[in-house]
Amino acid sequence: MPKSAPRSPCCSAISHCPSTISAAPRSGLAAKPKIDLDVVTISDGILPTAIEMVRAGDFVSHGDRGEKRWAFTRDYDGNGFKLYLCGPNNRAHRERLVFRDYLRDHPERAIAYSELKRRLAAEANGDRDFYTGGKAAFVGETLRLACLMT
């Protein structure tokens, strides 16, 4: 479900997709001052235009890692945000929403995720691939648990 109304005629949804911050108010979790947004376009055909629009907005493009979801950052090292751009019916986007919602409904799982992220951040020494890869098993298991509930 979109967190806010679309702001462009090429977008069908804009969703705030945080992870541990979803449960932070209820669990006392610390959360980084970062924003993760998923922007869903009205069609796959408009993606090239949307990608250029985002690039023109001073975002750094990190490309598509095979999910048909383009990653962008702005002021990543400060209090900036990550923006993911995808077409409708994108599996990665759907999974991010399922993961977010499961953590909101299961604060104990959000706490475990927060602890994992802290440990990985300490071990990664700035290596984002190591950090992201270290979360993969936890994310996969959480998605499996969420699917068991439906």
Image (cartoon, helix red, strand yellow):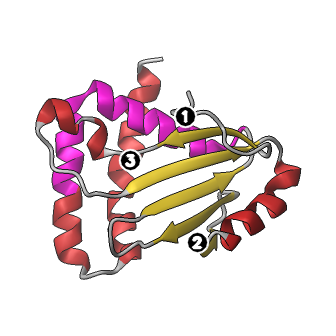
> Which sits earlier in the primary sequence, circle 1 or circle 2?
1
Specify the amino acid type for callout 3.
Val
Q: Which residue is at the front of the view, 52 or 38?
A: 52
Relative horizontal placement of residue 54, taking residue 95 as reference (left or right): right
Three-letter code, disc 1: Ser
Viewer-closest of 106 and 145: 106
The mark nearer the N terminus, 3 or 1, is: 1
Q: CA distance from mark 3 to mark 1?
A: 25 Å
Residue at point 66%, 38% (across, down) = 6
User: Which image quadrant: the N terminus?
Assistant: top right
Q: Which residue is mark 2?
A: 59
Which residue bears the numbered disc 1? 4
Q: Secondary structure at mark 2?
A: loop
Q: In percent of the image, x 74 and y 64: which residue is there?
A: 53
Position of residue 136 in the picture relative to residue 37 (left or right): left
In this figure, which residue is indicated by the disc labeled 3? Answer: 139
Magenta span has 91? Answer: yes
Nearer the observer, disc 3 or disc 1?
1
Q: Amino acid at mark 2?
A: Phe
Instruction: Find residue 116 and report its image quarter.
Output: bottom left
* Picture disc at residue 33: none
Q: Secondary structure at mark 3?
A: helix
Name the spot of residue 95 as percent of width and height, x first. Answer: 52, 40
